[in-house]
């Protein structure tokens, strides 16, 4: 399993939200590019960058930050937040982004996004599905920066794109995100079991090295971690073994 450090950018700052709440924001002293360079120096191969302004407003906003990060030697960057048009995918790829992360558009424009998967290839497009569990424990999708609920389950959404070459799926359990409460290991166990051909990226709740081992054991391809890494809850030696995959 690969550990992918995550940097959330809002207003040009490196931030973290608590359970997706824009009003519950922590701003970190280091700039996004300083954080990215630090991860690269520790051996990170990939970085996950979220444009929170873009996720909320529906258009790419923090171009300066992402352009700087794509220039960090040895670091491949996947970027999400506000990717709802083909022109945005084209722009991100032209800026040196290795993989474009598509969220709300995959729910609201499935035929269009299926065409992106076919045209750009499954290694250049990752679908991001943000979920909350309903009363029956079924993961239901949320869109528009986690503000709008849908009646579509995670598994229905993945099935819709499976025939179009879907390879990478980033799944975030919103109620775990930024809470340092531990990842929803059972959710990712179900994901890997139902769709073993998908390279699952688990996001939300990672707090320590034990959580990374737990996710590795259920078969996810990558674990996304933001707050735990920013706050030093996983030490350099522990990070190194996961950063190299």
Image: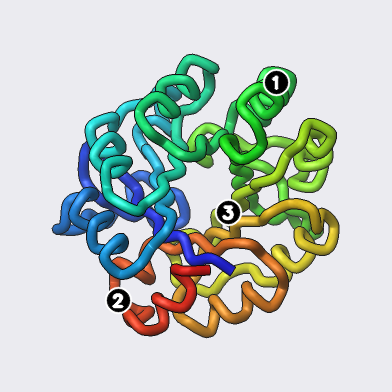
Q: Position of residue 96 (x, y in %)?
A: 38, 33
Q: CA distance from mark 2 to mark 1?
A: 40 Å
Which mark sits nearer the N-terminus, 1 or 3? 1
Which mark is nearer the camera, 2 or 1? 1
Q: Quadrant of residue 183?
A: bottom right
Please name the residue that numbered disc 2 is placed on.
Answer: 232
Count the labels in the image: 3
Mark 2 burial class by Cα count in 10 Å: few <14, some 14-19, many 20+: few
> In the rendered image, which residue does mark 3 sit on?
172
Which label was assigned to residue 230?
none
Front in this rendered view, residue 177 or 36: 36
Q: Is residue 127 above or below residue 27?
A: above
Q: Which of the two discs, 1 and 3, sits closer to the camera?
A: 1
Q: Residue at x 57, y 36 (%)?
A: 124
**x and y percentages locating residue 133 in the rendered image:** 69, 56
Q: Residue at x 69, y 36 (%)?
A: 150
Residue 98: give x, y in percent of width and height: 46, 39
Q: Is residue 233 visible?
A: yes
Here the colouring is rainbow
Q: Secondary structure at mark 3?
A: strand
**Crowding at label 3, few (<14), some or many (≥20) Cα neighbours within 10 Å?**
many
Q: Which residue is mark 1?
A: 115
Badge 2 marks a residue whose secondary structure is loop
């Amino acid at each position: 399993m690969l550990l992918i450090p995550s940097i959330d950018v809002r207003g040009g700052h490196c931030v973290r939200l608590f359970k997706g709440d824009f009003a519950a924001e922590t701003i970190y002293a280091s700039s996004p590019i300083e954080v990215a360079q630090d991860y690269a120096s520790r051996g990170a191969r990939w970085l996950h960058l979220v444009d929170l302004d873009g996720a909320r407003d529906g258009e790419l906003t923090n171009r300066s930050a992402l352009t700087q990060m794509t220039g960090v030697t040895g670091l491949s960057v996947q970027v999400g937040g506000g990717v709802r048009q083909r022109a945005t995918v084209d722009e991100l790829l032209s800026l040196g982004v290795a993989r474009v992360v598509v969220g709300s558009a995959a729910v609201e424009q499935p035929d269009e996004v299926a065409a992106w998967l076919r045209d750009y290839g499954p290694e250049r497009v990752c679908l991001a599905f943000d979920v909350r569990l309903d009363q029956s424990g079924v993961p239901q999708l949320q869109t528009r920066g986690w503000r709008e609920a849908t009646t579509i389950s995670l598994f229905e959404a993945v099935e819709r794109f499976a025939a179009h070459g879907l390879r990478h799926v980033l799944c975030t359990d919103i109620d775990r995100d930024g809470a340092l409460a531990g990842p929803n290991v059972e959710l990712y166990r179900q994901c890997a079991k139902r769709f073993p051909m998908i390279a699952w990226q688990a996001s939300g709740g990672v707090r320590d090295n034990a959580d990374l081992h737990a996710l590795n054991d259920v078969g996810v391809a990558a674990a996304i971690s933001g707050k735990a890494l920013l706050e030093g809850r996983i030490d350099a030696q522990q990070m190194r073994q996961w950063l190299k995959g």
